[in-house]
Image (cartoon, grey):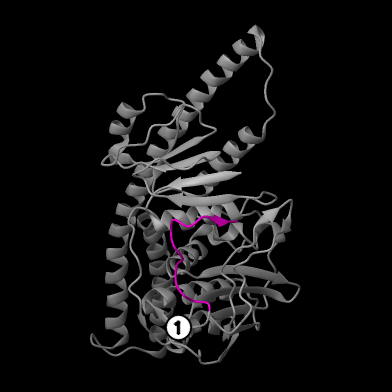
Amino acid sequence: MKIHLISSDEQLYRLCREVLTQIPGKQWEFAAAAPNGRPPAADLYIWDFDPAIATPEMRDFSDERENLFLVQRKDLELFRDRFPLAAVATLLKPVNQTTLRAFIEHAVARYEAPAEKSGPSVQALRSDREEMLQCLLYANLRLQEYDQDRTNFLARAVHDFRTPITAVNGYCGLLLGQQLGALTGEQAEVLTRMQHSIKRLSRMATAMFQLSVGRQITKSPELQRADIEACIDQAVHEVAPFAQEKHIEISVQVKRPPQPLYFEAAQIEQVLVNLLDNACKFTPKHGAIEVRGLPMFWERRTPRINGGQPLPNRRMLAVREPNAFRVQVLDTGPGIPAEHLEKIFEEYTSYAGGQDRSGAGLGLAICKMIVTAHRGRVWAESSGDGAAFSFVLPLSGAAGNTGAASFTESRGL
């Protein structure tokens, strides 16, 4: 099946490509094309609507099997004037990955459906079905608008919520510094525990704010040469009080990367804190957490898939020198059900049970958002001995890490 993204947004390209890799058993021909020209023939077009650019003429924009439009909310009225047909499948930007996947899967199912027979009764049934579909598409668009309103409200509320948390944390620090008088040992211990809880609450509020605002604001990380060992040490220092409460031993083994690592230190530190916090939460008392860091070869190309079997990928490298740096957080807590290994990184998701590793989709979703922005990858593995969370960051100047390929190049998935 040929799918074309009509956009110059590389981040959107990566999102679509990631969504397609999550739909197994299909052979895709996916490519991006410039919006100011007639696109090549395809079975499905994903249009990144820009009111400043005239949309090329096509034979029929009303067929949701062939066209999916991504529109900024501020441009929605103009889009409706240009495309008054309610049957046009429309998603509001910024696009939610889960929603995008659902729409693409629907388009694929329609594409693969057998041809319908013609006749008066079939035509009447088809007309009724199309009318129902128009109502559903319109209702879906309204739900997306309501979701954005909810997200914006949540972002403002959490932003206001963080201010008093910061103030209380400052007061605890003032008391612990004994600037307002001497403290007994018991008082100091209570204030220390209080400050640790406030920091935990502050991280949760920050995670909610980042999830709310992160999809609304496209911001690339400020890449600078940084020390991954220093980030790991700082993250371990932050979560040490929570580990000590449960008598959990944290060990660190890090091999120095052979090439420089460029990342935004504060963000990667946040990833490490979230992963360690998750590990502390689910590791039983007197358990152990291990942090490992080591260079590795990372094949960033995804093999094309046909009927569940990988097809040869001409871009697979013969020389497999380290081109990335992997950080692992391993714990001795409960494992993760295989069917939830991918879902736990989705926003606001959870699975039933008292050992839900997703944490309501806050910390792990933040990890995925940050690592993806750094052009890396994060994933989870599970075994009878516990869970392992890993992420990789590309090395600078390593073999095979030549940066992004030509954006308009056709790439098979």
- Compare residues 223 and 176 and report the one nearer the observer: 223
Crowding near pointer 1: few (<14 within 10 Å), some, many (20+)?
Answer: some
SS for dot 1: loop
Q: Is residue 34 left or right of residue 240?
A: left
The residue range painted magenta reads 400-413
Q: Is residue 184 left or right of residue 116?
A: left
Q: Residue 160 falls in which quadrant of the image?
A: bottom left
- Residue at the disc numbered 1: 397
Magenta stretch contains residue 411:
yes
> Which amino acid, mark 1?
Gly
Rendered view: 297 above or below 213? below
Dominant secondary structure of the residues highlighted in magenta in the image: loop
Rendered view: 115 above or below 309? above
Q: Residue 114 falls in which quadrant of the image?
A: top right
Residue located farthest toward the left when viewing the structure as drawn: 180
Residue 233 x/y as whole percent: 46, 88
Which residue is pictured at 41% across the width and 58% down the height?
11
Q: Is residue 15 visible?
A: yes
- Compare residues 349 and 133 and report the one nearer the observer: 133
